[in-house]
Amino acid sequence: MLTSDTITRLADELAVADREHTVIPRITARHPEATVEDSYAIQGVWRDRQIAAGRRLVGRKIGLTSRAMQLATGITEPDYGVMFDDTVHESGAMIPAAEYSNVRIEVELAFVLKQPLTGPDCTLEAVIAATDYVVPALEVLNSHIELEGRTIVDTISDNAAYGAMVLGTVRRRPDDVDLRWVPGLLFKNGEIEETGVAAGVLGHPARGVAWLADKLHQHGDRLEAGEIILAGSFTRPVWVEAGDTVLADYGDFGTIECRIA
């Protein structure tokens, strides 16, 4: 376990990297004794300082829930991070690449809650009942820790590599559609880069939300009504840079477009 001073120092490093859009050496290379709980403590220090500075928490992101993402990163268990109000964009948004590090795009579904959701033993059925609507989303990844050799401890410390999200416009009640079969076709500059279906997230994307409710319960927290939950990508991440145009086609859930500026 890391000392409180070390946790604070690493949170400070990540805050500077976030402001300056830079990358720091792997935490696990410098502190191989660091645990998953240490990494959530680092994230928590950073989160609390953001809130104290006036940012408003609007939801959480879940990462590494699909086999595609686990193979892409070499990490075999999910993680989560927080999302603030100034990171939410609508389809058609301009995403400034210079404000992020290691910029990639993922295809996801977002669950917007109408009721609080808590663990332990949260079920898929409980997630469906607590969800107001589901909407397609793109996640912009933003990694401030060197990618080579990273572990889940590194990614969690870095707020699960969350940068921003772009929301679609088609909203559906979760019991009106079989969410397992929502498709995702991701195009970059008119060329198809990735395809998948939402069942790639733990067999059903709502299971990712149930996992998060249980994990938050372990940390003395819960999901609140109104929160947006990014359930995890069902395609591998696609690298983007300034000048790229991204379009994701979700079938009956419509499309999302954004431009990387």
Image (cartoon, grey):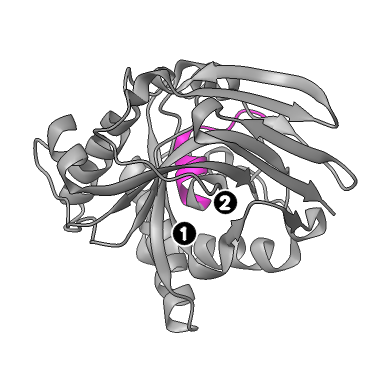
**Is residue 123 visible in this depiction of the protein?**
no
Indicate the secondary structure of the residue bearing disc 2: strand
Callout 2–callout 1 Cβ contact below 8 Å: yes
* Distance (Cα) linking label 2 and label 1: 9 Å
Residue 151 covered by magenta stretch: yes
* First of labels 2, 1 by sequence position: 1
Q: Quadrant of residue 14?
A: bottom right
Residue 141 versus residue 93: which sits nearer the camera?
93
**Screen quadrant of the C terminus:** bottom right
Q: Name the residue furthest left.
A: 121
Residue on which disc 1 sits: 83
Q: Is residue 1 above or below residue 179?
A: below
Residue 55 covered by magenta stretch: no
Indicate the secondary structure of the residue bearing disc 1: strand
Residue 165 versus residue 120: which sits nearer the camera?
165
Residue at 66% x, 35% y is: 147
Q: Which residues are magenta?
A: 148-158
